[in-house]
Image: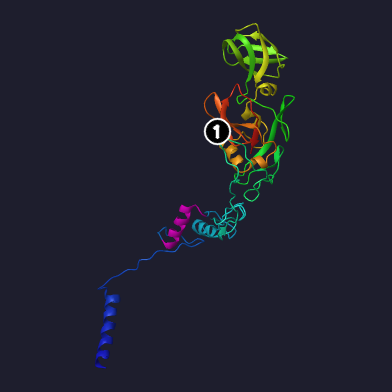
Amino acid sequence: MYKKKFLKPMIASLLVLLLVGGAISFGLSHVKAEQSGSTPESNATSRLITAYNTVVGLGFGSDAAGSWGDWGAKWNRLVSAAEFVLTGNAAVTDVKAGKTFYANTRGQQTGTYPAPGPCSTEAYHDSYGAPVTQTTNCTNNITWTANPSPIAGDDATGMDPRTGLTFSQLILNSSGTPTFSPTTNSTFTWDGTTSFTVTAAAATAGATYTNNGATFTVVTTIAGATTLVTTGTGAATASGTLTKVTGTGDATITFSAISAGASNAAVGAKTAKQICSDRGNGWRLPTQKELMQAYIDGSFFNLTQPSYNFWSSTEVSATVAWFVYLSIGGTFNGYKTTTSYQVRCVR
């Protein structure tokens, strides 16, 4: 009891000395919290500033006012970041089974799309191989369908669900106009040139000749050669005479046949690439591997008239390009100017 009575007055005296006498001085250090309205911000690194800097670094949210009003840049940023939802047009049926993603919700979603396997009895050949013996489509592995957003030129079941590519119908030279056809095709050179079979003719590159109302310009100089490579503005007769208009060369050159590129000349010397791109709607000449993959995925039993050689956009060199024989899956290369093959576009 005595000790308590003695200590209380002592503690009171010490407090008086601290507060009144100033024997000991001390201060309080604090960081202001950012607020809305007219209250100034301290610009110190508070927890709010730390959170704000984090979402800025992540690219989330905006300093601009929103539906909640204008609470100042930093609060605006945090509120808008909190409301952020990842957007997208993928559905669970579009995403490979077992893979997770976010789209139009902050909840994680899991894909259900079963990744299709290759058509088991179709395998491509790097060189010539025997045709496949299967007579029905591999519907248990992969089923080709019509594109859900169809456009003119789509093959009836031309969409490969493994790659997402849609193949066109065949390309036909219809009286000088390339058109899509489900049953009939024309052959074209890769580079748009026309090759005439001639007898020991001579002509210089750049010289022009006419036949059947069309003009043909010599691409490669020849001297006593039997093949004349040109670009043409129209269709020539099946055989006949080329008459010189300008340049250096024989005044007339007799040809016995058009060995390649008759359809290219008829459509205005269009290349295989141009024939596809001119169709618009994203049509283009497929690559070598896209054609090979189409065969692996079962194109032989899904595309109309697949039993042809089709040009690819893949080049071997300045004079040679790849083509694929979709009947057997073989891939080969041919000269761009002197060989003609079919054209099928993709998008």
Q: Residue furthest bottom?
A: 1
Residue 51 visible in image: yes
Q: Quadrant of the N terminus?
A: bottom left
Q: Quadrant of the C terminus?
A: top right
Q: Depth check: 132 or 184 in front?
A: 132
The span picked out in magenta is 46-60
Looking at the rendered structure, the number of numbered marks drawn on it comes to 1
Queried whether the magenta region covers residue 327, the answer comes back as no
The residue at which mark 1 appears reads as: 127
Write the residue at 73% across / 31% down: 184
Name the image quarter holding residue 324.
Answer: top right
Indicate the colouring scheme: rainbow
Name the image quarter holding residue 98.
Answer: bottom right
Q: Depth check: 134 or 103 in front?
A: 134
Callout 1 secondary element: loop
Write the residue at 48% across / 56% down: 55
Residue 41 visible in image: no
Residue 172 in the image: state x and y as whole percent: 71, 29
Q: Residue furthest top?
A: 251
